[in-house]
Image (spheres, helix red, strand yellow):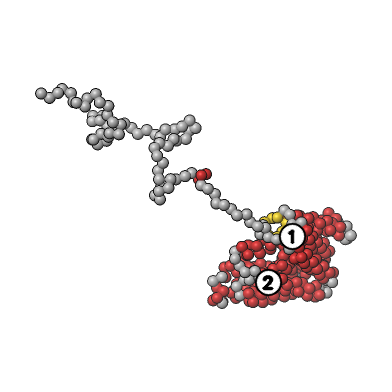
Amino acid sequence: MFPSTSPDAGRDPWAGDAPSGPAGPPSGRPPAPRTAPAEDESGGRRERGPRRFRKGGAPRRPADEIPAEDEQPVEPVEVRKPLALTIAGFAALLGVGLVLGAQTAGPGHRLPFAIIIFGVQLLFVLAWTMAMRPPALPLVALISAAVAAAANVAAVRSDIAGLAPLGYVAAGGFLLGVLGQLVRRVDRVRVTDSLGTTLLIVVGVVAFGTLITLSRIPAGTQAITVCLTASGVALMVARLTDAVLPWPRLAPQVPRGAAGVVVGAMIGTMVSAILGSYLVTPFTPTRAAIIGLVAAVAAVLADLAVGYAEAGRLMAGEPPTMWIARHMQGPLGGFALAAPAAYAMCVLFL
């Protein structure tokens, strides 16, 4: 006879034993609904089971656990005192030349001032083309020199002293420079990169021509004296301060300090206010200080922007340009921006 119970009855099954049949609910019962993952007390979901592995085999880690790359500190560029002193002297000489040249201008006698402006424009073309190196460099330099001469003639010969003739000259020179580079197959590939460079050089030389137009306006010569004196003093003091105390550094790659920019603009404004107390109506110390402040800030910011541009070219791996050209670029750019600022302040404020 067979026993009524199995011989294995009463024994505890092993925990590791799996049922021999397919996994699923007992027959006759519907499957239990799936529940959402359990949530912890903070409201977030609590993971169950082992963490999934990515395809490469490494577990996925949250972003805050990823180790940050070791950043090497950037060594600041050394500020060379003799170079800063030399640039300060060049800015002072340039400002003195422009201010004294403006005193030679008079009704029907503006040719000497135009010749002085043309010399400064040639320096601007030389420095900026050699520093920025646009495609078809000789062509851009020749066109910019021709635009400078045409702008001066338009400023002297125009019936009404205004900026419209200078604007037409600038637009024509820019189009001519772009077309000249499009004709050459070698420079056609880089013509997009050269648009900004050509525009900067052409507009810069035309900006100096606004000084001739300003000398034809009542109180324009006095405005030139105030604004260019403030700009020259601001540029000189900023460079002298960098030679003594280049702090705090605005960027490790730029050998300039914020103290020079601020102190230069302040002293330039103070000098313009002093000049305003000696000039005749409509100048007053307050008005002279305001227009001098605008010109001084424009000059020092343009000089600072040139330093950032030069640092960017060096970081991009471009070879350094002619030494004297890239260091003349800052003061020339500062006076080029201060000239239209002086014209605008004279027309709108005086």
The circle on residue 127 is: none
Residue drawn at x 78%, y 75% as measured from the top left: 115
The CA span between labels 1 and 2 is 22 Å
Nearest the eye: 150 or 38: 38
Q: Is residue 143 above or below residue 245?
A: below
In the rendered image, residue 173, in percent from the top left (x then y), is placed at 65, 72
Q: Secondary structure at mark 1?
A: helix
Q: Is residue 135 above or below residue 69?
A: below
Residue 91 seen in this snapshot? no
Nearest the eye: 234 or 179: 234
Nearest the eye: 104 or 253: 253
What residue sits right under mark 1 in the picture? Answer: 300
Picture quarter with the N terminus? top left
In the rendered image, residue 122, in percent from the top left (x then y), is placed at 72, 74
Q: Quadrant of residue 153?
A: bottom right
Picture quarter with the C terminus? bottom right
Residue 50 seen in this snapshot? yes
Q: Quadrant of residue 285?
A: bottom right
Q: Residues within 10 Å of mark 2 (few under 14, many from 20)?
A: few
The circle on residue 322 is: 2
Outermost residue, top side: 4
In the rendered image, residue 102, in percent from the top left (x then y), is placed at 82, 69
Q: Quadrant of residue 34?
A: top left
Q: Secondary structure at mark 2?
A: loop
Residue drawn at x 54%, y 76% as measured from the top left: 185
Residue drawn at x 33%, y 32% as measured from the top left: 33
Q: Amino acid at mark 2?
A: Met
Q: In the visual, does 238 lie left or right of 254?
A: right
Q: Amino acid at mark 1?
A: Val
